[in-house]
Each structure stands twice: as C-alpha cells, then as structure tokens.
Amino acid sequence: MDNNELNIKFFQRLIERYLDGETTADELKLLINYYESFQKENEWVEALGPEHVIKDRMLVNILGAIKDDEVAKGPKVISLFKSRFLKYAVAASVIAFVAVYTLMNRDGLKNSQGDTIVNTSIGIGTNKAILTRGDGSNIILQKGEQFALDNVESNGEELIYTNRDTEKTETAYNYLTIPRGGQFFVKLSDGTQVWLNSETKLKYPETFVDGQKRMVELLYGEAYFKVSPSTAHKGSTFLVANNNHEIEVLGTEFNVKAYNNESKVTTTLVEGKVNIKYQGKDHVLLPNQQSVLNRNTNTITFNEVDVIHEISWKEGLFRFDNKSLKEIMVVLSRWYDFDVEFKNKSVESELFFGTLGKHEKIEDILKNLKELEVIKNYEFREKKIIIE
C-alpha cells in the first residue's frame, strides 16, 4: 500500500471521527491541512475528482463547518448533499465532509439499489438572456452564440457595452431579461459590472453621459452590482431604482433581490456605502448590512447579515441557512426552470442548512431528500416536480 492510499484511509478515519463528534482541535486542523494539500498537489486533484467540485464543495464547507456546527443545537438540520452517511444526515457536520468522502470513493455516488436513471426535461441552468434594444428588436443571447452591433457585443456568456461620445438628445434604453434556468453578466457602458440571476429583468441606457445622473432599473429579480465610481465620471451619481424606492450608490458592491412573487425587497451591502431612499427618508448602509423592504406593510428594516449567504449564487453556489424546503424549492425552481407541487404539505416547513453547487442535477438533490426520509417520493411530469 503506497503513501497516498495510507493518507486517504487516515483521512477517512478523521472524517468518521468528525461525524461522530470525536475530533480534537488538532485533528480539525489536520483536516483543513489535508484540504490545502489537495489544492496544491495535482495528483490529489486527479485522484479525488474535478477541481471545480473540490473548490465548490470543500472550500466553502470545510472552512465554514466549525462555525456552522453550532447550528446543530438549534432547529432540525438536514444535509442537502448526497451521502452514504445517512445516519448522520441530521448533523450539521455532515455538510462539511461527506462531499470529500464521495470524491474519494467512486462508488459513494450510488445508493444500495444503484443509481436511478430519471427521464426528465429539467436540466441544469446555463448562461442565456434576451436583449431588447431601443427599437424594440429582441436578440437571443446564449452560450456559444456571438453577437455584435454598434457599441455592444456578446460571446454568449456576457454582454459588453463600450461608451461612445454621441450628440443624441434622447436616451435609448435596453432591457436584459434573464429567463428561469438562466444567468448572465453585463458590463454597462460606464464600466459598471452587473451579474444577473435567474428570472430577472434590468433596464439601462445604452450609453451614459459623464456628469449626468446614471440610473438603471431592476424591474424584478436579483442582481449583483459592482459600480464604476462617480470620480471616474465627472461626479455622476449611480442609482438603482426598484418600484418606489431607490439605491444611491456611493462607490460600492451590493446585491439587490426583488422578485415579483416575494413580498420582500432586500439590498445587501458588500463593500463601500449605499444610501437607501424610501418614503422621503435616507438611510446609509455599511458593509454586512441589509435593508428589507416589506411590500405588504410598506415598511423598511435594517439588519446585520452574513453576506456570503446572500451573494453565493453569484459564485455558483446556493447556501441555505435554516431555510424551509418550500423556500429552497422556490430558489431551485428559478435555476432549473420547473414548477413544484407539494402533495404532502407537512414537509414544506422542514428546515435545512447546507450548500449546493449550481452544477448539481435536480434529480440528485431529490434523491438525497428521499434517502434521508424527508420526503416519501417525488415525480417528474415534464417541467413539474410533485413531492409527496
């Protein structure tokens, strides 16, 4: 038996000790050191699986698991990862290392009955959008398709505008619509970068004029903004409008979530400052703060938040912090483009804590929930999932 095999077996024992709650602080440090070695040694990456899987599932989960362990003392916690360690599924610790174990054990991706092949038209989301130009024409943007016209071009994964000095007296507006099952990136003509989540629509001018107010409108959905500072545009203020409130940008990165089927609009600040304007009042947000506008009560509140949970979608992850199965299915339905029906209403309120990669197959997620006996069964009917 070579040294690599010995290391893997030792690592497996450490994982089992962690899942049993028996690891010491020194052993936890060893686990993190093993992770670091996997990232640095190419042969370990090849042996354990694709590098993006390691980064998605290990980096976030292992380094965050020690802090997250405390959650297990609170509401019921169920891992969303597919696991052979089913008896540990209600422990928050399973989130951290089960993915590592399945990477080291190729047969770890099979349950006792073997993999189930599911015939479904529900696929993993991808880069796609619809660009509506000022003249009303629609252009389909999708991965692998090139597009170029005037001051805008796309490679199918992003849309890039260049600023042009024009003498136009009227501003031409574009709309970028992201359907369910899609995501897209756009760089506006002033250099502002915007990541758009599934089921989102953004309105913006084709060009900005330095020295004049720069305004875009998030009609609905979710977007992450990295705004080009006003100092680079003769002091031009950048504003994001949504319904009856505005976000005045003071040079910053922030996330706005404003879906039509949700009663709350949230603005989460990552870097810099923003000024929330609502009902004639101003409130400045600082990093790690969030404003929550309740559309039903027309009230706004401000909270401290963990921004990682709020912006993980941008990094290709879904992070759920004590979210109900119903809430999780709403999020997943946008990315995978499906409708959901709960025949068993009691499972809607089951709480979850964990992280999923956006590259996961929806059938694997559902299979895990069934194996954990959270749901009795599930059924695919074209673009609809029925949960029992």
Image (tube, rainbow, N blue to C red):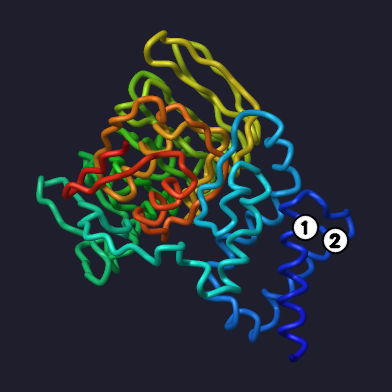
State the SS at label 2. helix
Whether residue 214 sits left or right of residue 52 in the image: it is left
Task: State the residue at coordinates (60%, 41%).
Answer: 90
Which numbered marker is on residue 27? 2
Q: Residue farthest to the top?
A: 297
The one nearer the camera, 141 or 312, is 312
CB atoms at circles 1 and 2 under 8 Å apart? yes
Asked where in the image residue 261 lies, by quadrant, the reply is top left
Task: State the residue at coordinates (56%, 51%).
Answer: 86
The one nearer the camera, 89 or 71, is 89
Asked where in the image residue 6 lies, by quadrant, the reply is bottom right
Where residue 68 appears, as percent x and y from the top left, is: 70, 42
Q: Is residue 228 visible?
A: no
What amino acid is found at the position of numbered circle 1 in the picture?
Answer: Arg
Asked where in the image residue 377 lies, by quadrant, the reply is top left
Q: Residues within 10 Å of mark 1 (few under 14, many from 20)?
A: some
Q: Where does the C terminus fall, quadrant-wise?
A: top left
Circle nearer the N terminus (1, 2): 1
Mark 1 — residue? 17
Whether residue 386 sits left or right of residue 103 in the image: it is left
Where residue 367 appears, as percent x and y from the top left, is: 40, 52
The total number of labels drawn is 2
Q: CA distance from mark 1 to mark 2?
A: 9 Å
The one nearer the camera, 79 or 329, is 79
Q: Residues within 10 Å of mark 2 (few under 14, many from 20)?
A: some
